[in-house]
Amino acid sequence: MKQNQVLRFVKTNATLIALVVLTVALAVADPTFSTARNLSNVARQVTIVGIIGVGMTMVILIAGIDLSVGSVVGVAAVVVTLLMQYGLSAWIAVPVTLVAVGGLIGLWNGFWIAHYRIPPFIITLGMLTIGRGVALTLSGGSSVPVTDPSFANLGSAYIPPVPTLVILAISAVLFVYKLVRDLKSGGQRNADRLAASIVIAVAGFALAVYVFGRGDGLPVPVAIFVVIAAAAIFVLGQTRFGRRLYALGGNEEAARLSGINIYQTKMVVYVTVSLLAALSGILLASRLNGASPNLGTMFELDAIAAVVIGGTSLAGGSGTIGGTIIGALIIGVLNNGMSLLGVSSFYQLIIKGLIISLAVWFDVLQKKK
Amino acid sequence: MSEVVLRMEHIVKEFPGVRALDNVNFEARAGEVLALMGENGAGKSTLMKVLGGVWPYPTYQGDIFIAGEKKRFYTTREAEESGVAIIYQELNLIPELSVAENIFLDRQPTSRLGAIDWRQLNSDTQALLDELGIRDFKPADQVRSLTVGKQQMVEIAKALSKRARILVLDEPTSALTDREVTDLFRIIRKLKQDGVCMCYISHKMEEIKEIADRVVVLRDGQTIGDVTPIADVTLDQIIARMVGRDIRDMFPKSVRERGDKILEVRNLEVDQPDVPGEKRVKRASFSAYRGEILGISGLMGAGRTELVSAIFGANPGATHGDVLIEGNKVDIRSPADAIAHGIALLTEDRKAQGLFLDQSIAFNTTISSLQTISAGMVGTIDVDRERALVEKYVAQLNVKAPDIDTSVGTLSGGNQQKVILGKWLNASPKIFILDEPTRGIDIGAKVEIYKLLDRLAGEGVAIIIISSELSEVLGMSDRILVMSEGAIVSEFTREQATREVIMEFATGARRMGH
């Protein structure tokens, strides 16, 4: 009986356990890995794929796909830096880029997919090529330097340790409050998930204090990612819109006949993922202090990998943002760890691919039972 | 008299909770057309699936004899090899391939290297078509380009290419034009001369009189009477055999006052997809009233589902005509519009169109009325309120499940249907349309659903029930519409309606004014 529970816990939280095992193993293999500075770096690297992954989770939840996100990263990076070269301040260039690049590309994809029912795979594959072409055309094929120095803050500034600790303390209190309320109302029935979320929260807070509570503090992109992820977790789990996504992905015909506006829902999802990809592009340009038109190449694959490793079904209808974050962390930790250990980048690709295959195989295996 | 090539003895086939076939006995001879008749759900299709090996031995009980030899089919292929071919209502052709490729699918003549010998393939096919006297299409024509009637002939040719001696035709004329029916009958007569035994499933009385030699009737999974020469029975006698059982005392019969007219449909038409000018629903006009249960009867494919789906806004591009609610013309362009106007539709196919199988009872119950459990621009869901609401419906409808977090995919058909009922009750409809509400569920759950509908009508909801079970329509409805071939052909009060008269109108044996 006890053994049974453990087994079930392992099964339902397999990716999380994989992440923990991977982290511990790397910490043992190379002491540099577990330094606060390195972990802070990992967090920042994960941010870019993580933000796109949040949007990609929503797309895959409704049984869609968006292959154009990598190109959106490139276009957004080029556009935001060019706008500043034309004399706009960072404060204006950033929102204009979000709307003009993220918004428009999202509307384009969403329109074809929702209105003409063109398979998302095809229309976003087209956008992948178009986007890259636009980025190359606008930039003339070469890198665009950043002219507004305040722009760099977005990607490379830090929230200092003391405010960071205050923010962490407030979030911890909020988390405990919500937990107590849920327990009272009986909302959290699933004991496994409850246990898992407490374990994750405690470990997460401890780790956050260790990594961000000293030195430079909390990198701004990481903070942005955390806010976006928290908002997405709330939207998917606690709002009408979230319910509609799960319904649409689970059974589109039933969703339509239940009165869900399929068109609108799809539009919002494809615009959201594009906006998030554009944001990633802006953050990347800020940190690199310039935009190469090739920025973001293959990011779509990392984002999809994070979502799939995180347990979201490609058939739609089931999956979580939390899973995607774990998936993104696995990819990020793996990249970082293998580089530290001096594994050749050629081998890194092979190992990454094998892990994606393994994750999907595991998912299929679980579904059969 | 010719040889008996097919005999089925004491066939029993059970599904969980239902005995679909309950001691079926009949025989068919070489060179005859045996009509197999019965209401929807009488067991005709199940019987043919047993014969075709779709339900393999030993998932059924009883014996099958082909040409006097006892057979047990473990696969459909074994049935085929014994000379049994079944042509289903939904044709099993691959539209992208040619006629010849479809007929010889996986059996194409090949050269020594394994490449398909196209010349041989096409000439074999042509020979087959010549034998059947088919001149309307060629072996190389793409199946996609053929009409349904011609595709059916491809299926027949395919069956004969496998040397079928027993050919089952399941409602072969349901989608054919008159001319195509004539062609089909010509081929059937030709096959008769060649000694092929044909089992012909159909609802259409006149057709049976024209083409069949003998008839056997199925009702509630049993053969009623013996195989009878068609000349020895009247259509009335056949209908009497089809509907003969008593209405069991399972329908609540509370007395209600009919309320105000709430729904009026005027000249509603629904286009037939892919066939310009053809209509699935033809100039349908009717009204529904508060506190009344309106039944819509008719055979499968009569256009009942299309009619109510159109009212529900499920097919806006193909729908023409007016819908009035409480006397005002409304423009319903989507199910969301319909729900906003107080209409609910419980769909015919609960798994494909009604349920989110991986999701919980709670999720399924609240999905079409999320505004009842959420508030504000953001639409934050009040989980406590949701649980309370769902618990209420689960108790009220007597849904049997461990808790409301149970995924509906694990529930029985009856409980799934109750979850969908709860979902629509939570939307508080003024007009509640139910398409085959009790299909595939056990008697106990059926009775509970009947009681619920009776209560809702008592509360002033207008109820519209589509059902293929005559006893259900007769037992539940205050008023009954009969549809046939896309049109509403007659209307009865509860007192006027009998099984026989409804069947006559539904099958087209009788028309208004005759």
Image (cartoon, coloured by chain):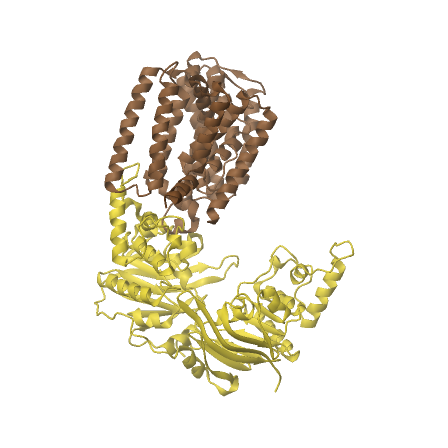
Chain colours: A brown, B yellow
Q: Position of residue B502 (x, y in %)?
A: 38, 75
Q: Residue at x 43, y 64 (%)?
A: B303
Residue A300 appearing in the image: yes
Residue B266 in percent (x, y) is at: 35, 61
Indicate the quadrant where residue B494 lies.
Answer: bottom left
Image point 29% across, 52% down: which residue? B427
Above or below residue B71? Residue A326 is above
Residue at the limit of the structure toward the right, as seen here: B112
Q: Residue furthest front?
A: A2
Horizontal side of residue B67 vs B235, given as left or right = right
Image position of B382 (left or right of B143): left
Left or right: B473 with respect to B147? left
Tally the numbered discs.
0
> Is any part of residue A55 visible from this angle?
no
Please report the residue visible at 41 percent of the width from the left and 79 percent of the height from the top.
B514
Q: Is residue B373 left or right of residue B3?
A: left
Give the image location of residue B260, x and y in percent.
Answer: 23, 62
Front one among A97 and B469 = B469
Residue A99 point in image, percent of width and height: 42, 28
User: Can you say whether A66 is above or below A171 in the image?
Assistant: below
